[in-house]
Image (tube, helix red, strand yellow):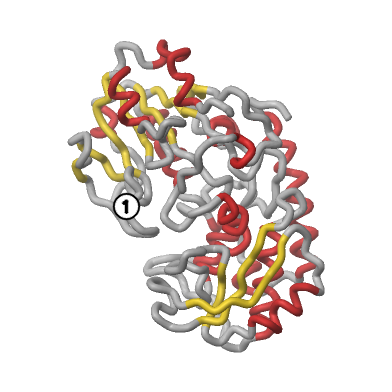
Amino acid sequence: MIKVGLENISEYMHLFEGKRVGLITNPTGVDDHFRSTIDILSEKVNLVALFSPEHGIRGNVQAGVELEPYVDEKTKAYVYSLYGKTRRPTKEMLDILDVLFFDIQDVGTRYYTYLYTMAYAMSACAEYNKHFVVLDRPNPVDGIHVEGNILNLDYRSFVGYYPILQRYGLTIGELAMLFNEEYGIKCQLDIVKMQGWTRKMDFLATGRHFVQPSPNIPTLETMYHYLATCLFEGTNMSEGRGTTKPFSLIGAPWLKAEEVIEALNAYNLKGVAFRSQYFTPMFSKHQGILCHGIELYLIDKDLYEPVYTGYVLLDVIRHMHKEFEILNPYSGGRAPFISLLTGDRFASEDGLTLEEIKKKLKQDKAAFTKIKERYHIYEL
């Protein structure tokens, strides 16, 4: 079993002794006995404030719901929201701190908002001369495989802010280092390292208890499929929210699932299997309506290319169904949400063939791999 950064903080006491400490965390911020980072730090340091990302520090808020400042029921500590009107810590928030800690388990995917909560906080710490410390955790879909297209900065948003791939193959601490150096944040940054983690490990191989990182990521397998199916959030199809298998299921009342699966099988996609499945979402898109859907099964994580699989799914479905639609931008948005998720316009406009997309993914993977390898803390 590996030790995460939280379990190694006794070796880094110099970072917070005599300091006023703030903490950005959520339910994944626990040790292997499920003790909260909040409780552990409150015993060791002068913990003066908590900062909440999307879903709240207790994971009790659904996706996309903006949070107002509130008092944490357990600790009675004031919690500043970083997923409401303010997504970047203000000067007033940071004036009471000397050092800001970050302890959240990411899912290894570019469009996960916790990454940009971290980046925005790093930027604020740089501006207001505060120390930023990441308690490192594993990349749950391993630190070897990378896949996707580099984000076009014309489509940067809170689900994709820097030019990285959808699957970036770095720990959250390594990613913080990349953000800090490659994109000019330049805050005072330290990483509390893990012990025992190697790049080939996915979360199952760590031997640690799985704590779901957000309400719609219930399993490790979901994290792999999330890389494939999250882009359907930008369409009129359900991505499985409101079911017991979000992101492992996609569908719509009009979907010809068996025909889609037959077409998918012709692509001989590795490491994944598909089956027809009916489901009725309890909330979100198509709430209360029977949908014909496709369920994804992880067969071999080392062969599976989820990002490319997602583009194949999108291409096959859109060309087989006149009912399929790309959703318009959110209120005030400048681009369809699917363009923000994919980090470019070719998905929303059907602008590239699958062969052209595959070529782009290969080129972008090669370019990004050269960058990311400079920030490896851990070996194979």
- Residue 158 x/y as whole percent: 45, 52
**Quarter of the rendering containing residue 95:** top left
- Residue 282 x/y as whole percent: 39, 73
Residue 275 vs residue 262, the one in the foreground:
275
Q: Which residue is mark 1?
A: 60
Residue 99 vs residue 334, the one in the foreground:
99
Residue 266 showing in the rendered view: yes
Q: Where 225 sits versus 82, above or below?
A: below
Residue 179 showing in the rendered view: no
Residue 55 vs residue 182, the one in the foreground:
55
Name the secondary structure under disc 1. loop
* 149 relative to 40 in the view: left or right: right
Point out the image quarter for the N terminus.
Answer: top right
Point out the image quarter for the C terminus.
Answer: top right
* 136 relative to 228 in the view: left or right: left
**Quarter of the rendering containing residue 181:** top right
